[in-house]
Image: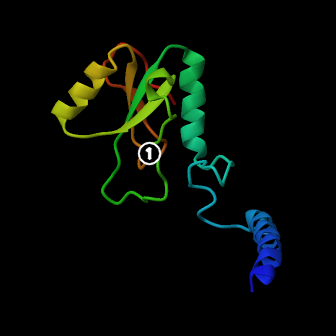
């Protein structure tokens, strides 16, 4: 039995890898909205990636507070960050209550704070303090 397992496992792995490659060409609604992960290096959320590029182009450090509507599609996640969050140029956080949001902005006081509303058409992104113009 052990000899068969030793021979079967590499074959099974190759078959699964071939299936994953073939599945990446098929249209799936989940392909376009998931964050990049260790198994899936393709970019999923293009609006989020575009926003990151615009903010990085502006220079400086940014904190994006994300306001979801109650009916938000949980497959379209916006709030995930690099492992070393304090050194990232753009970080994302969910909107909480006003006191918690103030505490978060105080912790990241060296960053420009933005409010993003991904569930609103045209994705409004506006500065939380009125020092800077909105990003479109």
Q: Residue at point 43% right, 36% down?
A: 124
Q: Residues within 10 Å of mark 1 (few under 14, many from 20)?
A: many
Image position, residue 126 (x, y; %): 39, 28
Question: In this rendering, would 24 be left or right of 78?
Answer: right
Image position, residue 71 (x, y; %): 34, 60
Observer-nearest residue: 53 or 104? 104
Q: How many labels does the image show?
A: 1
* Position of 39 relative to 19 (above/below): above
Question: In this rendering, would 57 be left or right of 64?
Answer: right
Observer-nearest residue: 36 or 3? 3
Question: In this rendering, would 87 be left or right of 14?
Answer: left
Hey, which quadrant is residue 51 in on the image?
top right
Image position, residue 55 (x, y; %): 53, 23
* Position of 94 relative to 119 (above/below): above
Observer-nearest residue: 136 or 35? 35
* Position of 49 relative to 87 (above/below): below
- Quadrant location of the N terminus in the rendered image: bottom right
Q: Residue at point 79% right, 75% down?
A: 6
Q: Is mark 1 on a helix, strand or loop?
A: loop
Hey, which quadrant is residue 103 in on the image?
top left
Q: Residue at point 43% right, 59% down?
A: 73
Observer-nearest residue: 6 or 55? 6
Image position, residue 97 (x, y; %): 19, 39
* Colour scheme: rainbow
| Residue extending furthest toward the front | 2
| Residue extending furthest toward the bottom | 1
Hey, which quadrant is residue 62 in on the image?
top left
| Residue beneath disc 1 | 118
């Amino acid at each position: 039995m052990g000899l068969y397992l030793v021979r079967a496992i590499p074959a099974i792995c190759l078959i699964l890898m071939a299936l994953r490659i073939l599945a990446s060409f098929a249209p799936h609604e989940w392909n376009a909205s998931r964050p990049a992960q260790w198994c899936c290096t393709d970019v999923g959320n293009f609006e989020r990636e575009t926003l990151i590029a615009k903010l990085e182009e502006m220079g400086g450090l940014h904190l994006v507070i994300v306001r979801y509507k109650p009916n938000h599609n949980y497959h379209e996640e916006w709030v995930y960050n690099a492992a070393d969050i304090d050194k990232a140029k753009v970080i994302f956080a969910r909107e909480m209550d006003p006191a918690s949001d103030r505490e978060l902005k105080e912790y990241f006081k060296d960053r420009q704070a933005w409010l993003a509303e991904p569930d609103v058409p045209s994705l409004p992104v506006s500065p939380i303090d009125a020092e800077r113009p909105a990003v479109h």
